[in-house]
Image (spheres, grey):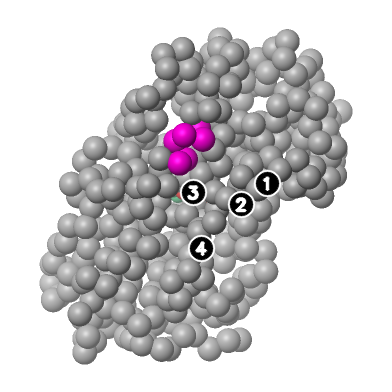
């Protein structure tokens, strides 16, 4: 067991895993960038080590505290609570800090900067809410609301330095190695990665892909969706990882990749289906056409998030491509049969590919989340 960072100036990131992988995915990525690129001593407090282990297989879910890539990973609540020596506490996704933790912060000689990291949204109101503060109702503590986003008025998006040049350097040999390590030959047709929620209209998509005259390779990582794909393929195809063929469609089953390798899947494909928040951001950095399925929320907040993103993404995209993209995203997110809108989306794949690269370059100008958090803390922590 490795002693945690007790040096002053530590940052504590507190993460409750609601479900799926994104809470852990975003927090682990942020912790790594803060540690490796800003030399910030980071402690990641997380309540579900199994989920984090899926993203970072070297983690030992049995340890209450351990060091991974220089980050102290503490299983909460088994690892107790941090010493009140943190300079910054990041409450991820407004998950709520334990009351005893807040009490400790209030009693500290120098209370830490308390930042609530919000969920990503492209909605306009984010710009005017980013960086606002509100006092704790009972204690003399200030909380600051930090919003990731798509404009320079927000906290920006997490992006490791050199990511886009690594993407651009991921050429034919790297792609062949990627598929070969997974037991597959290089695709002989455009490749599509599929990461979505179980309620996506999968059967309609697979049938449309299989019936299309243009061949396609579909790569599906292990998860609930792969089980549904196996069901669609029929009983004779359940064993192994394929490839399995239906019409012009070839299906490949992949393992759930470590987070550090998921980018390679996105770069090895020509088109990516993503969901939630972190894979959604990674697909934008990948510079490939994408379909996004936001995490379903009450009162259709996810539909508003999708509409707000499409308004930004399609602002300078020519009509036929924008129309086809919006139509398919609408079908995909309304669980409506995409058989009609999938062929039209394939028709504009080249326009979307050019646009996706332009978009990732434009995004890179809107600031990087970890750097903006460090800058914000420098301004606030006297
Ligand atoms: O898993 P998600 O649906 O997580 C969601 C969202 O974060 C959502 O905002 C949140 O409210 C909800 O959880 C509770 O989608 P997301 O955000 O894309 O996270 C998936 C992570 O898994 C991401 O870091 C990419 C990673 N991943 C791998 O590392 N390997 C893989 O093979 C795949 C498919 C994904």
> Residue 278 got which mark?
3
**Magenta stretch: helix, strand or loop mostly:** helix
Q: Residue at x 40, y 69 (%)?
A: 13
| Residues at marks 3 and 2 touching, judged by CB atoms closer than 8 Å | no
Rendered location of residue 69, percent (x, y): 59, 73
Mark sitting on residue 325: none
Q: Earlier in the sequence, mark 2 or mark 4?
A: 4
Mark 2, residue position = 166
- Real-space CA distance between mark 4 and mark 3, rounded to the nearest whole angstrom: 11 Å
Q: Position of residue 40 (x, y in %)?
A: 42, 76
Report the span colored magenta. Answer: 356-361
The answer to if 359 sits in the magenta stretch is yes
Element on which disc 2 rests:
helix
Front residue of 126 and 339: 126
Report the front residue among 40 and 212: 40
Gap in Å between the C-alphas at discs 3 and 2? 18 Å
**Which residue is tagged 1?**
170
Q: How far separated are the C-alphas under marks 1 and 4? A: 24 Å
Which mark, residue 28? 4
Which quadrant does the C terminus fall into? bottom left
Disc 4 CB within 8 Å of nearest ligand 1 atom: yes
Label 4 or label 3, whichever comes before in sequence order: 4
Please report whichever mark, 1 or 4, sits nearer to the chain's N-terminal start.
Answer: 4
Q: Nearer the viewer, mark 3 or mark 2?
A: 2
CB under 8 Å between discs 1 and 4: no
Instruction: Report if the beta carbon of the residue with label 3 is closer than 8 angstroms to ligand 1.
Output: yes
């Amino acid at each position: 067991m490795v002693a945690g960072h007790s040096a002053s100036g530590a940052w504590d990131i507190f993460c409750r895993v609601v479900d799926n992988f994104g809470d852990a995915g975003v927090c682990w990525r942020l912790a790594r960038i803060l540690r490796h690129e800003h030399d910030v001593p980071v402690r990641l407090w997380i309540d579900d080590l199994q989920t984090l282990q899926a993203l970072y297989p070297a983690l030992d879910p049995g340890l209450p505290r351990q060091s991974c890539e220089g980050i102290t990973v503490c299983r909460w609540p088994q690892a107790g609570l941090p010493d009140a020596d943190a300079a910054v506490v990041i409450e991820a996704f407004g998950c709520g800090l334990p009351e005893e933790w807040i009490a400790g912060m209030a009693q500290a000689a120098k209370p830490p900067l308390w930042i609530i990291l919000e969920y990503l949204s492209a909605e306009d109101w984010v710009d005017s809410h980013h960086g606002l503060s509100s006092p704790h109702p009972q204690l003399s503590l200030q909380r600051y609301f930090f919003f990731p986003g798509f404009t320079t008025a927000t906290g920006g998006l997490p992006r490791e330095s050199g990511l886009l040049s690594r993407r651009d350097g991921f050429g034919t040999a790297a792609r062949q190695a990627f598929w070969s390590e997974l037991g597959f030959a290089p695709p002989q047709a455009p490749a599509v990665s599929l990461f979505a929620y179980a309620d996506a209209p999968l059967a309609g998509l697979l049938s449309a892909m299989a019936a299309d005259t243009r061949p396609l390779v579909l790569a599906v990582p292990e998860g609930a969706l792969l089980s549904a794909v196996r069901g669609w393929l029929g009983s004779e195809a359940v064993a192994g990882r394929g490839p399995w063929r239906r019409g012009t469609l070839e299906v490949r089953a992949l393992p759930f990749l470590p987070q550090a390798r998921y980018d390679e899947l996105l770069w090895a494909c020509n088109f990516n289906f993503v969901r939630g928040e972190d894979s959604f951001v990674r697909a934008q950095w990948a510079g490939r056409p994408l379909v996004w399925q936001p995490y379903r929320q009450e009162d259709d907040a996810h539909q508003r998030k999708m509409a707000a993103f499409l308004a930004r993404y399609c602002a300078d995209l020519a009509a036929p491509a924008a129309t086809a993209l919006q139509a398919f995203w609408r079908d995909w997110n309304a669980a409506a049969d995409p058989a009609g809108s999938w062929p039209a989306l394939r028709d504009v794949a080249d326009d979307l590919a050019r646009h996706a690269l332009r978009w990732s370059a434009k995004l890179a100008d809107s600031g990087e989340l970890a750097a903006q958090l460090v800058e914000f803390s420098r301004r606030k922590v006297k």
